[in-house]
């Protein structure tokens, strides 16, 4: 099972979205927390529809696909390694366990009908603080508001759970992710990251 510690982010409004239930083609009941239209580019492209889905353990194939893509595309941005989730580590039950972390909130962003991003919120021993982990957006979907939606949805979840702070880890050389998190209201702390010995920095967002 993935460690429940402050989350490293590969990449990377406050509206109250009313959950609705939607049945997938496979029969799995998936909760959709909202969608938003992102304006198209000035060149005349059509607007982008972003949908945020809350996953259950039955959605493990979708999570697996995105997680392996994240670890491949941004290997230095996470506490886990691609090799940890391949071979003997690539088991259905292990993926299900990852999505079964008690009281966790596991999200996938769907852009124009295609899963392109992921994030999770997990509790910490401090009930007033939640962690943002496993944050990643596919390169093709960056700059289209997907990361902002994923971060904000986890922040709303943490607030609903009674937390007053949201925490994450980020590598100091990950300027794009750091800029995203600053834009989302996170600030650096003096606390060192604890997922890897590579000098990750901790950022906090008051809720």
Image (cartoon, helix red, strand yellow):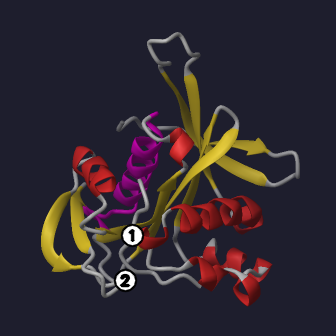
In this rendering, is residue 95 above or below 139? below
Q: Position of residue 142 (x, y in %)?
A: 47, 41
Residue 152 part of the magenta-drawn span: yes
Structural crowding at the residue carrying mark 2, measured as other residues with C-alpha within 10 Å and reported as few (<14), some (14–19) or many (≥20):
some
Chief secondary structure of the magenta span? helix
Q: Residue at x 39, y 71 (%)?
A: 7
- Tag 1 secondary structure: loop
Structural crowding at the residue carrying mark 1, measured as other residues with C-alpha within 10 Å and reported as few (<14), some (14–19) or many (≥20):
many
Q: Earlier in the sequence, mark 2 or mark 1?
A: 1
Q: Residue at x 52, y 69 (%)?
A: 104
- Tag 2 secondary structure: loop
Describe residue 48's horizontal placement relative to residue 166 as left or right: right
The quadrant of the image that shows the C terminus is bottom left
Q: Residue at x 24, y 44 (%)?
A: 183
- The residues tagged by marks 2 and 1 sit, at their Cα atoms, a distance apart of 8 Å
- Residues marked 2 and 1 touching at CB (< 8 Å): yes
Q: Position of residue 32 (x, y in %)?
A: 63, 43
In this rendering, is residue 123 above or below 27? below
Return the residue nearer the eye: 23 or 67: 67
Return the residue nearer the eye: 186 or 140: 140
Magenta segment, which residues?
144-168
Q: Residue at x 33, y 54 (%)?
A: 177
Q: Position of residue 111 (x, y in %)?
A: 61, 36
Residue 55, label in figure: none
Task: Give the image quarter of residue 169.
Answer: bottom left
Residue on which the image places disc 2: 195
In this rendering, is residue 180 above or below 9? above
In this rendering, is residue 2 above or below 71? below
Residue on which the image places disc 1: 8
């Amino acid at each position: 099972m993935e460690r429940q510690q402050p989350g490293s982010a590969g990449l990377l409004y406050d509206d109250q979205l009313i959950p609705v239930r939607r049945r997938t083609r496979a029969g799995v009941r998936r909760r959709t927390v909202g969608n938003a239209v992102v304006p198209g580019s000035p060149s005349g492209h059509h607007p982008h529809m972003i949908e945020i889905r809350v996953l259950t353990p039955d959605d493990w194939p979708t999570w697996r696909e995105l997680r392996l893509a994240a670890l491949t595309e941004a290997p230095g941005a996470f506490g886990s390694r691609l090799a940890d989730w391949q071979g003997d580590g690539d088991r259905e039950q292990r993926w299900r366990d990852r999505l079964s972390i008690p009281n966790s909130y596991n999200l996938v962003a769907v852009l124009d009908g295609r899963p392109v991003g992921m994030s999770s919120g997990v509790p910490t021993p401090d009930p007033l603080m939640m962690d943002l982990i496993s944050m990643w957006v596919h390169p093709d979907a960056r700059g289209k508001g997907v990361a902002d939606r994923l971060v904000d949805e986890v922040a709303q979840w943490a607030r609903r759970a009674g937390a007053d702070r949201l925490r994450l880890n980020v590598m100091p050389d990950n300027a794009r992710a750091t800029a995203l998190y600053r834009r989302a209201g996170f600030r650096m702390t003096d606390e060192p990251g604890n997922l890897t010995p590579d000098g990750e920095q901790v950022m906090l967002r008051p809720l």
